[in-house]
Image (tube, rainbow, N blue to C red):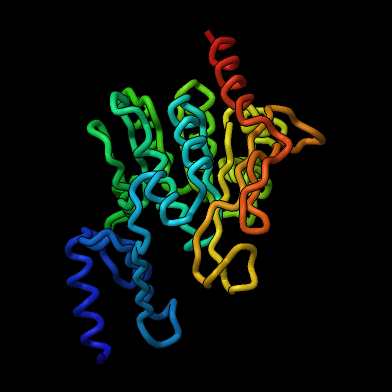
Amino acid sequence: MSAEEVRDLVERLLMWGGRRLDLSHPFVDARLPDGSRLHVAIPEVTAAHWAVNIRKHLIRGKSLQELSALDVMSADVATFLEDCVAHGLNILVSGSTQAGKTTLLNALVSAVPAGSRVVTIEEVFELKPKLPDCVALQTRPANLQGEGEIPLRRLIKEALRMRPSQLVVGEIREAESLDLLIALNSGIPGMATIHANSARDAVAKLQTLPLLAGENISHDFIAPIVASSIDLVVHTTITRNQRESGASQPGKRRIVEIASVTGRIENGRVEIEPLFTFQGGKYQSGLGNPRQVFERRNHYMVSRT
């Protein structure tokens, strides 16, 4: 395919998503009609040629039980996560790129009780929860005059005016994490994904990202908010080779760790307790008690009232 044909193809793809690509905006992130994610970078950001990447969602499971049937998790873990969603726990899904975070988040959101009003916030539409009352919001880049941009932080603030019973952010990367934590700390249940290597790293990163919101935000201010706002961290991974734990083939996605946030802070770090850990081809119970996760959230909500 020639360079001109690549340009024509990208332009046709971008017409559907309403995004643009030019010298002033050399990157673009868009969604294709089938739900795939399109990312394009052009020179002079790239050395010589256009870099076109398309990420397709290969896992077709739309519910936690369907993901369990695909061996992403055990049936017991799927049932536990359904109970967590039903109790309105605040859940953080962590993992590396292509580990299935968005697929898992979509299944978690689909487990929200049918009478709930869910507001999803994403950079590019990817979530498609099976819910009768779901408002989907998407960011918007600035125009040629540098105006009209709608970032994630703005959408989170606007979502709070939509009477959400569940707030879902597709992925937190920067200062929008502060706005999400403040929303969760006000009593609105929510979920989000974050890039991290483990559940503990995810919580540590969540303590760091809000500092990007400004110099007046300190670590001592953020730590208590994280400890009281997040209830559960679900870490998922993708196997790279057959020697990894429990993997029969490379490219296998699986939940490998579920940890609860205890609400305690030790030496400035938010404390977590493992509930389930995937080791030796099966899930092992951790030090934490899964039932106490529900009791802690109920106690917190009663204390706020």
From this viewpoint, is residue 25 visible? no
Query: Of 65 and 216, which appears nearest the observer?
Result: 65
From this viewpoint, is residue 259 visible? yes
Q: Is residue 277 left or right of residue 154?
A: right
Query: Of 268 and 132, which appears nearest the observer?
Result: 132
Above or below residue 203? Residue 228 is above
Query: Of 139 and 70, which appears nearest the observer?
Result: 70
Above or below residue 237? Residue 140 is above
In percent of width and height, residue 22 lies at 29, 71
In percent of width and height, residue 226 lies at 62, 33
Q: Residue at x 58, y 31 (%)?
A: 231
Q: Which residue is outermost to the top?
A: 305
Q: Is residue 12 left or right of residue 40?
A: left
Q: Residue at x 59, y 73 (%)?
A: 242
Tell me the quarter of the image containing the N terminus: bottom left
Q: Residue at x 64, y 63 (%)?
A: 245
Q: In which image quadrant can residue 244 be found?
A: bottom right
Above or below residue 134? Residue 209 is below
Q: Which residue is outermost to the bottom?
A: 2
Q: In which image quadrant can residue 154 be found?
A: top left
Total label count? 0
Q: Is residue 261 left or right of residue 251?
A: right
In percent of width and height, residue 56 lies at 34, 66
Q: Residue at x 60, y 43 (%)?
A: 258
